[in-house]
Amino acid sequence: MNTAKPSPDTQPHCLGVRVKQLTLSFSGQTAPLFSQLDLTLQAGEWHCILGRSGCGKTTLLRLLADLLPQDVAWQGELFTSDARSMSDRVAYMAQQDLLLPWLNVLDNVCFSFRLKQGKASEAVQERAIQLLQQVGLGEKLHARPSQLSGGMRQRVALVRTLIQDKPLVLMDEPFSALDAVTRYKLQDLAAELLAQRTVLLITHDPQEALRLGHHLFLMQGKPGRLTRLSVPEGTPPRAINAELAVKQQAIIEQLSGLGERYV
């Protein structure tokens, strides 16, 4: 892989990232979680990482978000396509919606601005209202999280991620707790609203990865390594069809250790 180079025509919301030769260990562990791990995130595209629980997917996400605990030591290099720091250019969407129960929907969406600036500006609030209307929550601005369904809460969390306006979006299984129909709809919504952003999605669901990913990777082994997987034809979000179903089964078999190498 080549080191990403700054580009004068790079769009404001397109950021390429390259992780090179990453080795990472937790304090007290003799073997590293990762060793010589390489990953390139292409600007403006979706990247999905699959793998069994405990293989290190979330740890990789937290490294990129600068959220690792103090007892984690790592070596390697991080490059960006514009040669600038990643600091304050990353948005993180977790599996749990993490909405504050004492705030209404609008205030939850604008919370990061209140935290940094004391309050959200009128422009930020107007943008938040527009996004909430776009995801079908225009009539829920003053509702509390307890008054929302699980799918509604995740839509609020998605808008809270979007309002931060960051070029790199990290998503840690944000739709896994939802029913199949709601998950499918939110996948399409996220693909639409995060178009032109660089996205890294961690998921246990091969179908989700195949629907959304421009690039797919399987994390496996001790220490962990990334293997590139082929993607179906077509632009994400892809419809569920026979080709996707065959690739989904192949990934499931590889994850379970029953399949041959999938390339």
Image (cartoon, rainbow, N blue to C red):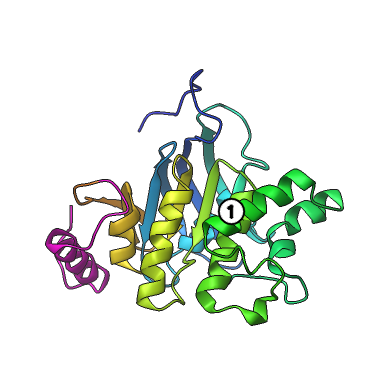
Is 241 within the magenta?
A: yes
Residue sitting at x 36%, y 65%: 51
Circle 1 is placed at which residue position? 131
- Residue situated in front as seen by the camera: 62 or 160: 160
Residue interval drawn in magenta: 235-263
Residue 224 seen? no
Is 27 within the magenta?
A: no
- Would you place residue 115 above or below residue 20 in this image? below
- Residue situated in front as seen by the camera: 67 or 138: 138
Q: Which residue lies furthest to the front in this view?
A: 139
Q: Which residue lies furthest to the bottom in this view?
A: 146
Residue 8: percent from the left, percent from the top? Answer: 51, 17
Residue sitting at x 21%, y 65%: 248
Residue 79: percent from the left, percent from the top? Answer: 52, 34
**Lateral position of residue 165 relative to residue 43, left or right:** right
Give the amino acid at mark 1.
Answer: Leu
Count of numbered tags: 1
- Would you place residue 161 above or below residue 87 in this image? below
Q: Quadrant of the N terminus?
A: top left
**Lateral position of residue 187 relative to residue 259, left or right:** right
Residue sitting at x 87%, y 53%: 118
Residue 232: percent from the left, percent from the top? Answer: 20, 51
Q: In which quarter of the image is residue 3?
A: top left
Q: Quadrant of residue 154?
A: bottom right
- Would you place residue 201 above or below residue 98 in this image? above
